[in-house]
Amino acid sequence: MSERTTEHAMHRIFTDHESNVRSYCRNFPAIFQSARGAILTDISGREWIDFLCGAGAVNYGHNHPALKRAVLDYLADDGLVHGLDLHSTAKAQFLEAFQSHILKPRSLEYRVQFTGPTGANAVEAAFKLARKVTGRRGIVAFTHGYHGLTLGALAATANNYFRGAANVTMGDVTFMPYDGWLGAGVDTLAVFERYLKDPSSGMDLPAAVVVETTQGEGGINVASVDWLRGLADLCRRYDILLIIDDIQAGCGRTGPFFSFERAQLKPDLVTMSKSIGAYGLPMSLVLIRPDLDVWKPGEHTGTFRGNNLAFIAATAAIETFWVGTEMVRTVRARAGELRESLRAIAAHHAGRIEPRGIGLLQGFACDEPALAKAISRAAFERGLIVECAGAHDEVIKTMPPLTIGSTELARGCDLLREAVDAAVEGRP
Ligand code: PMP
């Protein structure tokens, strides 16, 4: 591209040539060039604090030096980058680190299935395996849940904006009310159990339940520990497999490495993606309870299963952040600061916004979607990237890097406060 190509001309490249399906770039219409830690920089040198973090794909911030060093060293040595699912030193190191620093200290025993690189790929594999193991077809998903947009995963994704684009029958998934969906004080698991108990409810015994312990795209809905434990117990009693979708809430986002640790669950299957590749490099996997690993060789295959560069970054991330308990303490500390800031902002606008969330997956629900949209826009104008989530896009969702410092977090929260003040007063 010629040096004289102006920013305006560059914008034209996207509007002229990229599909109408593009999304985030419409809300954050800068042309980004570089990124470091929590800071994104555009072609003219303007900076934004990143409270979006690739929707949870860069939990350790952008271009973290320890991860970058490992990736650069591997490339400099001509390490194997693509190898289908061939054995590689990079894969061996990742499996070893994951086993000794993540699974073993938590007394978890799983086989690791590497799927295609997206979250939806992992969800598809988990559903297929659950159906194969049980010989049943049904999956139970929850209201406001999000599990990806390929057809199998989409069938378990609740939002009709996404479902409406498919124009095919999406069967074999039943939606049950998530914790809190029927209002405070209503035990939604009792509703679910009523369906299971009654042979004339119309619901066949499902193969599996799929659930996010905190719904990200659905608007930061945090399931209670009691509800999660009750769900696991229900699954056990009715012989239904429990799939935890930890694609967004996992990898430390809510504090512990797995989001289900707060309820001390041992799911049958776990889907992981986004930050498991640590550097924003695509890699996804399914954790499989060993006795459920009934796949025949190559039965669920794909070209890009196991991204060696991602293995290198992921191993470095595990060794840098997840040996010992330092990371959990750090996230807890930053989460407390974020909670205080969001509470203070909300206190100024009581009745219009209400804080919610857990760990570094927090935000607030707005009384109308237009307000959330205006806040996100005003934040972008002021140098902060923060997105909307929820059934009506009425929730402001903040996902700062887990590695963000207190000062930078406070600066981001100041920008958010200014954006909320402006949006509530109808200023740009
Ligand atoms: N599950 C959850 C909980 C997610 O948040 C997402 C992505 N937002 C997915 C699945 C799908 O991941 P991908 O977009 O990589 O297919």
Image: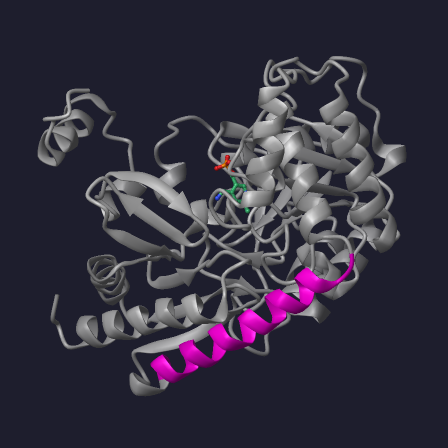
Which x, y percent locates residue 227?
69, 67
Identify the residue at horizontal 28%, vertical 64% (top origin).
372
| Residue depicted at x 85% and y 44% | 100
Work out whether residue 383 or residue 46 is closer to the camera in this orientation and state it.
46
Q: How many marks?
A: 0
Magenta segment main secondary structure:
helix
Q: In screen coordinates, is 99 left or right of 311? A: right
The answer to whether one can see residue 122 in this image is no
Do we see residue 62 in this rendering? Answer: yes
The quarter holding residue 302 reads top right
Q: Quadrant of residue 264?
A: bottom right
**Residue drawn 43% across the image and 26% down it:** 168
Q: Is residue 136 above or below residue 298?
A: below
Q: Is residue 205 above or below residue 384?
A: above
Residue 247 belongs to the span the image colors magenta: no
Residue 224, given in percent of the width and then of the height, sits at 65, 69
Check the image and report above or below for 169 versus 372.
above
Instruction: Please give left or right for residue 298 compared with residue 347 in the image.
Output: right
Residue 7, image quadrant: top left
The range drawn in magenta is: 324-346
